[in-house]
Amino acid sequence: MSDSKSPTAYSAPGKVLLAGGYLVLDSNYSGLVIGLSARIHSVISSTGAEPGRITVKSPQFTESDWHYQVEEDGRINAFHPDPSQPRKNPFVETTLRYVYAYLTATSTSFKPTSTGLLITILADNDYYSQPSPDVPQFNHLGVPISKAHKTGLGSSAALVTSLTAALVAHLSPSPLDVTSGLGQSKIHNLAQAAHCAAQGKVGSGFDVAAAVFGSCVYHRFSPAILEQVGDAGVAGFNSRLAECVDKEWDFSVEKTGLPRGVRLLMGDVDCGSATPGMVKQVLGWRKEKAEEAKKLWDELESRNVKLIKGFEELSKLAKEDQQTYDFALEALAAGDISHASESGSKFSAAFDDITSYVASIRESVREMGEASGVAIEPAAQKRLLDAACDSVNGVLGGVVPGAGGYDAVAFLLVDNDQVIDNLKKFLSEWKFEGDADVQAGGTVKSLKTREEYAGVQKEEGVIPEQYL
Ligand SMILES: Nc1ncnc2c1ncn2[C@@H]1O[C@H](COP(=O)(O)OP(=O)(O)OP(=O)(O)O)[C@@H](O)[C@H]1O
Ligand SMILES: C[C@@](O)(CCOP(=O)(O)O)CC(=O)O
């Protein structure tokens, strides 16, 4: 266990599912998930005063303190010092339950009540819509979390993952090295189990995978892995959870990333919310029209794989001839077509391929949307994506990420200040007109976050003094 004076801090990244929404729910299909620079940080200090007492705070929000008492046997009871103010944070509570249960089952020298804990959760600003682009780090939003407008970067997965890693590192008598393969797998399995339980459903888990491993091509785990665990508090839970976490799961992650000189820019589309039940409806269509759906999914998968391979091809070219590669990037940024082809047809063709792969993925996604009756790339989003790609030089393509709908857009662009400024300006001036089913008049805010490849990591010196 770490000594009571030094806090333990771990952070985990947010995510964007660039390709493979819905398909990634089936382990036969790939999800291309890019980890983001926006992180959630969990900082833990031991407090000697009240053994087994855990206080969790999210200082960026009002009414955001949660209190727990650990029992001798590692069970966790939630309470609030002012009983007229009951409040719950299922993601925090379930993570605490799962980590204490796991440590109790796997270590005889773990004493659940040997220390009290003060836990501070800090989210980078991009997880929530901010009133202006110039707010201070860890801006205080002045509202409870439930009232903050989420930007869809996977706050719960990053929270559960960073909290799991920080708790294990702080409490375990034999700390796991989260940078080792084994350590990462255990953190993944434990965080994935806790996240599914807190959500009350088993999704593909791509968000937790990205929070642990960073950007990757993801194939999901079999949901049956979690069936044996049962509910926390039921007899035998601790050992069933430990057995589940310690065994090898059948997911796969292949580390990936964008080619050098290409970046991601996300837009938060503040125009109504995504239709509830999109996943249910798409899966319902897939079941009902199995043959048609399989054909469509297989085609879409092959297009997604082309994009994944297209990134690899560009990364190879970037190494093969740095200068010609940079020349092609510059020509793209300047919208200089003739210059681009002079720069070596192989190089400019590889960038053109990315543009056409993204366009063909979007075509298949719209087809799936039409067939299933779900607005995955709604007409209003199509207008925005097409206009941005057509009018801003250096934009290679754009998609509605994840489940799609009206929440967000993600662009791939040349990592050049002029291109970034032009795209941001374009988005800020775009009048989001909405479709028949969505309120008109929304705006599109560019987020500051961009791709980043690291997964969960220990933090040293990142957290300002006042939070330690
Ligand atoms: N800063 C935070 N402090 C404490 N709890 C948080 C924080 N941010 C998120 N959470 C927890 O995560 C929940 C939000 O999870 P939810 O799955 O709805 O969003 P998300 O993961 O950001 O969404 P998406 O999957 O669309 O990206 C909150 O209700 C809260 O329980
Ligand atoms: C539709 C789905 O494939 C992706 C949802 O992604 P997001 O939460 O919209 O980023 C669901 C899942 O993978 O669990």
Image (cartoon, rainbow, N blue to C red):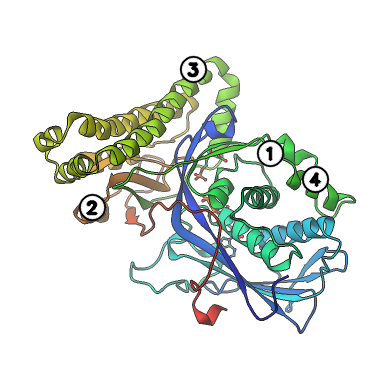
The residue sitting at the top extreme is: 291
Residue 186 % position (x, y):
68, 50
Quadrant of the frame with the C terminus: bottom right
Nearest to the eye among marks 2 and 3: give it.
2
Amino acid on which disc 1 is placed? Trp
Looking at the rendered structure, the secondary structure element under dot 3 is helix
Front position in the image: 135 or 229: 229
Quadrant of the frame with the N terminus: bottom right
Q: Does residue 215 appear in this view?
A: yes
Residue 291 appears left or right of 392: right
Spatial separation of the CA atoms under disc 4 and disc 1: 11 Å
Residue 333 % position (x, y):
18, 46
Looking at the rendered structure, the secondary structure element under dot 4 is helix
Spatial separation of the CA atoms under disc 2 and disc 3: 39 Å
Instruction: Find disc 3 in the rendering and name its residue.
Output: 295
Q: Which mark is residue 416?
A: 2
Instruction: Find disc 4 in the rendering and name its residue.
Output: 243
Instruction: Find disc 1 in the rendering and name its residue.
Output: 249
Front position in the image: 140 or 250: 250
Residue beneath the point at 66% across and 41% down: 202
Residue 64 % position (x, y):
61, 71
